[in-house]
Amino acid sequence: MFSLQRALRVGTRVCALVLALAGQGAGAAGGTGAYPLDWGRAGETLQYRSCGCADRCWVAEVKHQRSRKTLATLRCDCERLFARVGTSGPEVERSPTCSAIDDGVNKPRAIREALEQMLGR
């Protein structure tokens, strides 16, 4: 019989595999449409969307409002946290786990603070 912890690990791995096959979650089912998070900078917006795994797969992007140019992206693939500044910069693994953001008291604030740090603000 599976323990709850083992079942969660297996579920997380299955979700990560599905997302990898779907092209980094762009077409994964079970997500939400994008919606804004508090950003507080004129001319920019912070958009968040979930791609599944009980909101453990998500993408947050800071964009210039007028040009829609992406300034920074932070994403979780159900396990690992990735970051990218700009659109042409490399995506790098920021953390082997997303728990610092996902398990915190205020997930939207943690996302905002991580993106502010990435942008040097």
Image (cartoon, rainbow, N blue to C red):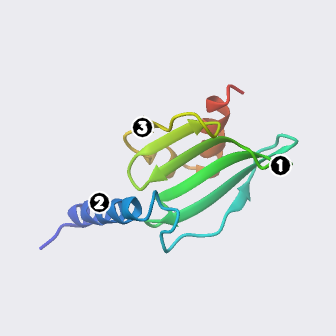
Q: Nearer the viewer, residue 31 or 89?
A: 89
Q: Which residue is mark 3?
A: 95
Image point (88%, 41%), residue name: 42
Quadrant of the snapshot with the C terminus: top right
Q: Is residue 94 left or right of residue 117?
A: left
Marks 2/3: CA–CA distance: 17 Å
Q: Which amino acid, by three-letter code, is at mark 1? A: Gln
Q: Residue at x 46, y 44 (%)?
A: 81
Q: Is residue 103 visible?
A: no
Q: Earlier in the sequence, mark 1 or mark 3?
A: 1
Q: Are marks 2 and 3 in contact (CB under 8 Å)?
A: no
Give the number of the mark in front: 1 or 3: 1
Residues at marks 2 and 1, CA–CA distance in whole angstroms:
36 Å
Q: Contact (CB < 8 A) between labels 2 and 1?
A: no
**Residue at label 2?**
13
Q: Is residue 99 above or below residue 84?
A: below
Marks 2 and 1: which is nearer the front?
Answer: 1
Q: Amino acid at mark 2?
A: Arg
Q: Earlier in the sequence, mark 2 or mark 1?
A: 2
Q: Picture coordinates of residue 65 (x, y %)? A: 83, 49
Inspect the image, locate mark 3, and give the three-letter code of the amino acid beneath it: Ser
Mark 1 to mark 3 CA distance (whole Å): 28 Å
In the picture of the structure, the residue carrying the numbered disc 1 is 65
